[in-house]
Image: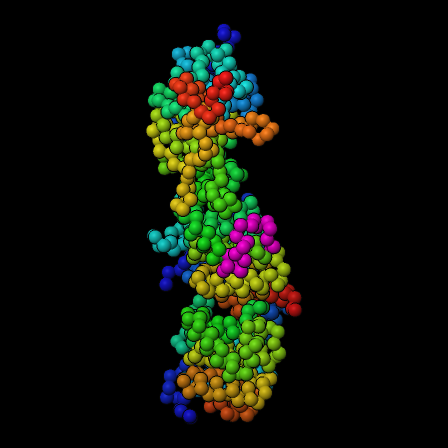
């Protein structure tokens, strides 16, 4: 089986400081991988390098495109990379307002990606927007409301709908449950799990919340000071951590 | 007259503007940056259009200025006088006789010819501005032809008003490539953007020039199920009885009486001189 | 029922498996917990792990499941060496071949019980209605009242949670099953149901490894006992 994403030797420096270095992994179709580590460990830098928001100083991010098979997205043309960003890739930001157009209605937010890839039938676009609102458990009658009138959890679900409407194959998530109430988090996690299964999505989830990765991620990568210190099956890394830092991280979690 | 260089601007500046105009004509709809000069009038009074006109005019030209279709508003009169004084060119109020027409917010009703140039005053040249405020991002969207956002605006219109409510500055796609703001002309005028004359657009404050060469394809954006419509008030002109011209609504008194008249004053006058009489034509004449 | 295990090829086979924990944050203390573990379980067989508390029964089971990492040796389950397999191979193994009924139910809060039980089937691509029907059948059999099916099991009593866990573990007909105290905290009726499920699984050819403190249950369903004390490093020394 061809990996959906092959990451080879990704490196990013901020001056003399290491953002991330020597990151290598393969992600297969349908796999969900968590990336954990404390603030400043390089996990967000890595995610942004992989998603094409930052240009890595070295390394390859090879994506198995529908049309041409595996292509290095670091060296591909910007139009092609941005096209990927609107079709086969999705990016869910921690703060919904970074991923939504706050002055555009919920329906318009969901429809944007469809229109960006050429949808020109208002009725169809609206029908798909309504369908996606339903899938992320937002009432249909909110379709014309602006996201500013939504709660934090609803905004985050709307952001997910907006991203998934073009049925991407790879979703990048940066702390998708960060800043949400615990009860709202649970609902979002459940929703994400269902969508990942139904759509066969592959996902990379950056978080510092170990409970989130345990429930969502098949695999886990632990980062510290820009380097991957441990990776493996999620429950194995969490229940039998091998690296000193992972052991510290796992033992630092407060038990409820 | 000797106090000014021809048409106010110095020759170097005009050459710079002409280069921008030529580039604009070569890449229809593309916003060409130019070093806009301070003009002896405030921004918003057509400084972009005036600079384009200054770079376009020759001593042999006949110049006409319209503001919302009218030749006799303060703005139109001021600009016309400005070039009378600084360029000494002939001026006219007749569309037919003009070789260069500077306009604010209208396209003349009479079809323009190949030997005419229409210069638009543009307040905001960037059609994507209202949805994406970052200039770096909108430039990238233009260069990569990412125009989905433009349709988001139309989608919002339909979802809020049941129809595309954008009535002026209605976005168009030029020569199948660039999405362009046609300046705040009513969308009634959009079909006329495909014409024989050269169309030049100048935005002074924003320092942009763009152009539509003669006979260039200009398509108003729309949805399959909500097609573009060039709408106008559903009346005939009360002065000249024209049914095909864009109308202004004029309140006549406190009792709510009103009349509809051609916004293009030259067109209306020409028709009346040819004997067309509207509903209130006799009274007004009397 | 007693078929000779030696003639059949083993579904689960452990060879020379050892394990130690290194506690980096506690002076890098090395705690050896298992050495030279050997185990063979053929299809249709049920083996009980025995030994005193702390002898390593759960550790061994977790290693077979891939939850704990083996330091040495081979852990073959249906042709996959869990000790060396890539995460996605273990995930595929867990989805299709190897089931595990742990003592604790770990689920996303607010997900309905019926969904929790149906999930292993949905992950295999079984149509939703079929998966739910199977889940409903198991829940009914384990005497979970139907009015609870739409609720999250997180609010259930210990015994109810245990039965939901068992239902989930038996939803798919795994060729290999790990059972950690499946009959603990169950009343006699439900205990009988669970033992019935285990016997049915054996009959269809599942290889089963279980930890049973309940000696009677162990005697009823297990073909053999393996004392893991033999693999504890202290015993070996």
Across the whole image, how many numbered discs are drawn on residues? 0
Q: Tell me the residue at 46%/65% (across/down).
A: A197
Q: Let me know if residue A175 appears in the view.
A: no
Residue B100 lies, with reference to residue C35, above or below; the image says above
Q: Is residue A155 magenta?
A: no
Nearer to me, B205 or C132: C132
Nearer to me, C169 or A13: C169
User: Looking at the picture, how far across and down is residue C115, in whole percent?
Assistant: 51, 71
Q: Is residue A150 magenta?
A: yes
Q: Quadrant of the C terminus of chain C?
A: bottom right
Specify the color scheme: rainbow
Q: For residue A155, which quarter of the picture?
A: bottom right
Q: Tell me the residue at 39%/18% (across/down).
A: B274
Residue A92 lies, with reference to residue B16, above or below; the image says below
Identify the residue at the far top of this view.
Answer: B2
Is B228 left or right of A134, judged from the image as shown?
A: left
Residue B188 lies, with reference to residue C216, above or below; the image says above
Q: Tell me the residue at 54%/64% (across/down).
A: A190
Residue B87 lies, with reference to residue A49, above or below; the image says above
Q: Let me know if residue C97 appears in the view.
A: yes
User: Looking at the picture, how far across and down is residue B157, in whole percent?
Assistant: 50, 43
User: Looking at the picture, how far across and down is residue C116, in whole percent?
Assistant: 52, 72
User: Looking at the picture, how far across and down is residue A249, in whole percent?
Assistant: 61, 63
Which portion, as a residue range, is magenta? A133-152
Q: Tell me the residue at 42%/92% (across/down).
A: C1
């Amino acid at each position: 089986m061809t990996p959906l994403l092959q990451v080879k030797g990704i490196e990013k420096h901020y001056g003399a400081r290491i953002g991330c270095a020597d990151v290598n992994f393969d992600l297969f179709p349908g796999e969900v991988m968590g990336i954990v580590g404390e603030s400043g460990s390089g996990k967000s830098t890595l995610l942004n390098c992989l998603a094409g928001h930052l240009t890595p100083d070295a390394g390859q991010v090879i994506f198995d495109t529908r049309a041409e098979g595996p292509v290095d997205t670091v060296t591909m043309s910007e139009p092609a990379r941005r096209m990927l960003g609107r079709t086969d890739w999705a990016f869910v930001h921690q703060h919904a307002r970074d991923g939504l157009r706050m002055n555009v209605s919920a329906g318009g937010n969901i429809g944007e990606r469809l229109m960006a890839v050429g949808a020109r039938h208002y009725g169809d676009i609206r029908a798909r927007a309504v369908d996606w609102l339903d899938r992320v458990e937002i009432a249909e009658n909110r379709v014309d409301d602006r996201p500013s009138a939504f709660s934090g959890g609803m905004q985050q679900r709307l952001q997910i709908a907006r991203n998934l409407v073009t049925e991407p194959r790879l979703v990048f998530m940066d702390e998708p449950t960060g800043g949400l109430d615990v009860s709202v988090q649970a609902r979002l996690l459940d929703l994400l799990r269902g969508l990942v299964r139904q759509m066969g999505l592959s996902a990379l989830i950056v978080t510092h919340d170990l409970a989130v990765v345990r429930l969502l991620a098949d695999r886990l990568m632990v980062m510290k000071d820009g380097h991957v210190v441990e990776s493996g099956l999620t429950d194995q890394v969490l229940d039998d951590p091998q690296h000193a830092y992972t052991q510290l991280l796992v033992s630092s979690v407060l038990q409820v | 007259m000797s106090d000014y260089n021809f048409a106010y601007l110095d020759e170097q500046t005009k050459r710079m503007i002409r280069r921008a105009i030529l580039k604009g004509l070569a890449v229809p709809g593309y916003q060409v940056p130019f070093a806009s000069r301070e003009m002896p009038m405030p921004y918003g009074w057509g400084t972009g259009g005036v600079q384009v006109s200054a770079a376009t005019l020759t001593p042999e030209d006949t110049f006409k200025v319209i503001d919302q279709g009218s030749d006799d508003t303060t703005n139109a009169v001021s600009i016309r006088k400005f070039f009378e004084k600084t360029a000494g060119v002939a001026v006219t109020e007749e569309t037919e006789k003009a070789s260069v027409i500077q306009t604010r917010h209208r396209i003349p009703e009479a079809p323009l010819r190949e030997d005419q140039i229409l210069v638009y005053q543009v307040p905001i040249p960037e059609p994507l501005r209202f949805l994406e405020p970052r200039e770096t991002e909108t430039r990238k969207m233009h260069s990569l032809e990412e125009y989905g956002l433009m349709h988001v605006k139309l989608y919002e219109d339909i979802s809020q008003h049941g129809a595309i409510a954008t009535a002026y500055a209605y976005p168009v796609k030029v020569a199948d490539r660039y999405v362009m703001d046609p300046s705040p002309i009513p969308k009634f005028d959009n079909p006329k953007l495909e014409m024989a004359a050269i169309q030049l657009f100048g935005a002074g404050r924003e320092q942009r020039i763009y152009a539509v060469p003669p006979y260039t394809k200009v398509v108003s954006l729309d949805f399959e199920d909500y097609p573009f419509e060039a709408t106008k008030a559903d009346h005939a002109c009360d002065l000249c009885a024209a049914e095909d011209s864009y109308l202004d609504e004029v309140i006549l008194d406190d009792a709510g009486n009103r009349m509809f008249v051609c916004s293009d004053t030259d067109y209306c006058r020409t028709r009346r001189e040819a004997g067309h009489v509207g509903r209130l034509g006799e009274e007004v004449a009397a | 029922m007693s078929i000779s295990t030696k003639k059949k090829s083993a579904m689960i086979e452990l060879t020379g498996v050892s394990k130690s924990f290194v506690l980096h944050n506690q002076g890098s203390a090395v705690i050896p917990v298992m050495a030279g573990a050997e185990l063979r379980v053929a299809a249709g067989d049920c083996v009980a792990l025995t030994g005193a508390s702390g002898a390593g029964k759960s550790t061994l089971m977790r290693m077979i499941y891939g939850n704990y990492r083996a330091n040495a040796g081979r852990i073959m389950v249906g042709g996959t060496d869990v000790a060396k397999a890539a995460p996605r191979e273990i995930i595929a193994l867990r989805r299709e071949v190897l089931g595990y009924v742990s003592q604790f139910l770990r689920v996303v809060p607010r997900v309905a019980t019926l969904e929790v039980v149906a999930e292993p089937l949905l992950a295999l691509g079984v149509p939703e209605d079929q998966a739910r029907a199977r889940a409903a059948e198991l829940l009914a059999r384990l005497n979970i009242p139907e009015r609870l099916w739409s609720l999250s099991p997180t609010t259930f009593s210990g015994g109810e949670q245990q039965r939901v866990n068992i239902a989930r573990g038996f939803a798919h007909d795994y060729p290999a099953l790990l059972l950690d105290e499946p009959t603990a905290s169950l009343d006699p009726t439900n205990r009988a149901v669970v033992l019935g499920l285990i016997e049915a699984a054996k009959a269809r050819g599942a290889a089963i490894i279980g930890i049973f403190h309940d000696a009677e249950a162990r005697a009823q369903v297990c073909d053999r006992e393996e004392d893991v004390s033999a693999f504890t490093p202290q015993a070996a020394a």
